[in-house]
Image (tube, helix red, strand yellow):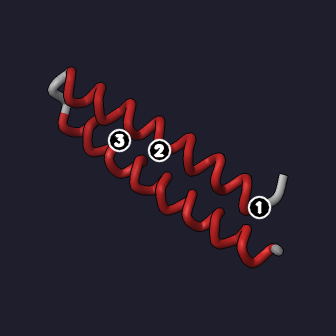
Amino acid sequence: MKSGTKDQAEGTFHEVKGTIKEIAGKLSDNPKLEGEGTGERIAGKVQEKIGQIKQVFEK
């Protein structure tokens, strides 16, 4: 798997995982878990964008 594609896949995974943590934090009234989820979701978006940029330059 190419580096850009791998980054996009991992980024999407982290976005989903972060969203789930955010929802779990809200439901359980746990601000720490909600904050972790928000951070992970944002990091996933960044990683996905990096993967898209890598794909452009790999061609």
Q: Position of residue 9 (x, y in %)?
A: 65, 47
Question: Which residue is the site of mark 2?
Answer: 15
- State the CA–CA distance, disc 1 to disc 2: 18 Å
Q: What SS does tag 2 mark?
A: helix
Question: Which residue is the site of mark 3?
Answer: 37
Q: What SS does tag 1 mark?
A: helix
* Amino acid type, callout 2: Glu
Residue at position x 72%, y 62% from top? Answer: 4
Question: Relative to 45, does residue 31 appear above or below in the rendering?
Answer: above
Question: Which residue is the site of mark 1?
Answer: 3
- Judged left or right of residue 22, residue 28 is left
Question: Relative to 43, does residue 54 appear above or below in the rendering?
Answer: below
* Amino acid type, callout 3: Gly
Question: Relative to 37, does residue 55 appear above or below in the rendering?
Answer: below
**How many labels, in total?**
3
Question: Relative to 17, does residue 56 appear above or below in the rendering?
Answer: below
* Amino acid type, callout 1: Ser
Q: Position of residue 10 (x, y in %)?
A: 62, 47
Q: Position of residue 11 (x, y in %)?
A: 56, 51
Q: Nearer the viewer, mark 1 or mark 3?
A: 1
- State the CA–CA distance, disc 1 to disc 3: 25 Å
Furthest residue toward left = 29
